[in-house]
Amino acid sequence: ALERARTEREAVAREADQRFLAELGAALQSTSDPTALGELALRRLAARFAVPECGWGTADVARGTLVMRQTVRDGVLLQ
């Protein structure tokens, strides 16, 4: 019974993940502007993971640097 409950929870979580990804993909079709695309994706990801801040950047492992390209904090685009 415990194993079945765990399997059911995992299936529900997978379905929710797939639904989120499908909805995100559909929403991203609404614009071709790179800044708007990033902002939309970051807002959706922050909401999905219930975090106040979300961002993306580029990492240069050889140089040991991370450059943030866009950040959304509390729903507001910072960069």
Image (cartoon, grey):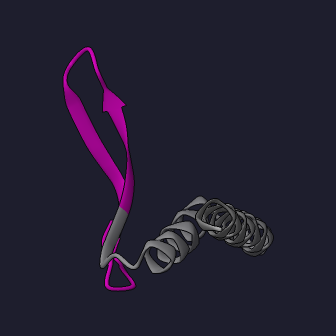
Q: Looking at the image, is 61 positioned above or below residue 66?
A: above
Q: Quadrant of the C terminus?
A: bottom left
Q: Identify which residue is drawn at 64% across, 62% down.
A: 10
Residue 54 vs 73, above or below: the answer is: above
Going by the picture, which residue comes out furthest to the front?
1
Q: Which residues are magenta?
A: 55-79
Examine the rendering and report whether any part of residue 14 can be seen: yes
Please report the residue visible at 70 percent of the width from the left and 68 percent of the height from the top: 8
> Tag count in the figure?
0
In the foreground, 67 or 74? 74
Q: Find residue 27 and report its image quarter.
A: bottom right
**Dividing the picture into quarters, in which one does residue 13 lie?**
bottom right
In the rendered image, residue 78 lying in the magenta stretch gets the answer yes
Q: Is residue 69 magenta?
A: yes
Q: Residue at x 60, y 59 (%)?
A: 34
- Counting from the top left corner in percent of width and height, residue 65 is at 21, 31
* Residue 79 relative to residue 63: left or right: right
Outermost residue toward the left in this view: 64
Question: In which quadrant will I find the N terminus?
Answer: bottom right
Residue 23 x/y as whole percent: 75, 74
Q: Pick the residue in front: 38 or 2.
A: 2
Q: Is residue 71 visible?
A: no
Is 30 positioned to the left or the right of 34 in the image?
right
* Prevailing secondary structure of the magenta residues: strand
- Residue 20, picture quadrant: bottom right
